[in-house]
């Protein structure tokens, strides 16, 4: 069955960096777009980025453009989100999701807290 | 950005009764490939979102048939024919036609 397991969250100071990982199983990872979506505590959902199977088609929400970098390693069935220049408003649970337009499976999420 | 407006935001329902959630988009959601990328998600307390309905009316595998989706263009609806206790949670519509993909504010379903 499809499984997506995020890791790498934690507490970081404003201006700091963090790298999130998502390990996929149960499907052919290299065939599909993958995405990152976040949810601030007690708030709604924000779609922040997606990447094509080859990594050549990448898009970001304006709120993270220039600070976050999505990438993937198909050999390891892994998706990554490098987050730099973190701000308090980046505090959220970060989910990886399978595909872009379909968003059919989501992981359990990893919590990122940006605070001094 | 395409604004997705859900109503109601709070939905108290008696067990066994029907429920309906409306989702309206600020622009048509028909994509250039002819598909309408409007999905519905359920987020139970303490869990990650789970997709229930994709592309307006297609039910995901394992989703009870008491859930149904309908609509077109800019107006969409999620219906639950008979609410059960396990349906408690927050329901979101999401459009994936226009970037950035956007979600409705969420509708919190609770048992009366």
Image (cartoon, helix red, strand yellow):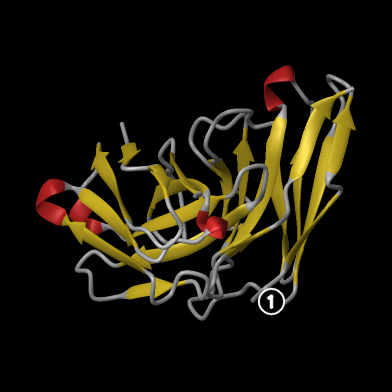
At numbered mark 1, what does the secondary structure look like: helix, strand or loop?
loop
Residue placed at 73% from the left, 18% from the top?
B85
Q: Nearer the viewer, residue B18 or A109?
A: A109
Residue placed at 35% from the left, 64% from the top?
A84
Image-quadrant location for residue B89? top right
Q: Nearer the viewer, residue A38 or B102?
A: A38
Residue placed at 43% from the left, 35% from the top?
A108
Q: Nearer the viewer, residue B34 or B27?
A: B27
Question: In the image, is residue A13 above or below residue A1?
Answer: below
Q: Residue B40's x, y, as percent?
A: 63, 49
Q: Is residue A5 left or right of residue A97?
A: left
Q: Residues within 10 Å of mark 1 (few under 14, many from 20)?
A: some
Q: Is residue B23 left or right of residue B102?
A: right
Question: In the image, is residue B34 above or below residue A74?
Answer: below
- The C terminus of chain B lies in which quarter of the figure? top right
Q: Residue A33's x, y, as percent?
A: 32, 61
Residue at the far front in the pictured view: A116
Q: Residue A107's x, y, as percent?
A: 40, 39
- The N terminus of chain B lies in which quarter of the figure? bottom right
Image-quadrant location for residue A26? top left
Q: Is residue A81 left or right of residue B10?
A: left
Count of all numbered marks drawn on residues in the image: 1
Residue placed at 87% from the left, 26% from the top?
B17
The residue that label 1 is drawn on is B28
């Amino acid at each position: 069955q499809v499984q997506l397991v995020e890791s790498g969250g934690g507490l970081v100071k404003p201006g700091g960096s963090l790298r999130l990982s998502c390990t996929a199983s149960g499907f052919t990872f290299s065939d599909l777009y993958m995405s990152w979506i976040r949810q601030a505590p007690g708030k709604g959902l924000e779609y922040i980025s997606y990447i094509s199977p080859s990594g050549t088609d990448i898009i970001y929400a304006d709120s993270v453009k220039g600070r976050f970098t999505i990438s993937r390693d198909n050999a390891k069935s892994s998706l990554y989100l490098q987050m730099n220049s973190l701000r308090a408003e980046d505090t959220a649970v970060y989910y990886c999701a399978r595909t872009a337009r379909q968003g059919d499976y989501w992981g359990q999420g990893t919590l990122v807290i940006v605070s001094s | 950005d395409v604004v997705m407006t859900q109503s109601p935001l709070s939905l108290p329902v008696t067990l066994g009764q029907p429920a309906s959630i409306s989702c309206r988009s600020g622009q048509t959601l028909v994509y250039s490939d002819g598909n309408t990328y409007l999905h519905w998600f359920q987020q139970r307390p303490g869990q990650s979102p789970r997709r229930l309905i994709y592309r307006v009316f297609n039910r995901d595998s394992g989703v009870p048939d008491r859930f149904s989706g309908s609509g077109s263009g800019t107006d969409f609806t999620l219906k639950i024919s008979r609410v059960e206790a396990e349906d408690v949670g927050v329901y979101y519509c999401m459009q994936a036609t226009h970037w950035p993909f956007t979600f409705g504010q969420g509708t919190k379903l609770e048992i009366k």
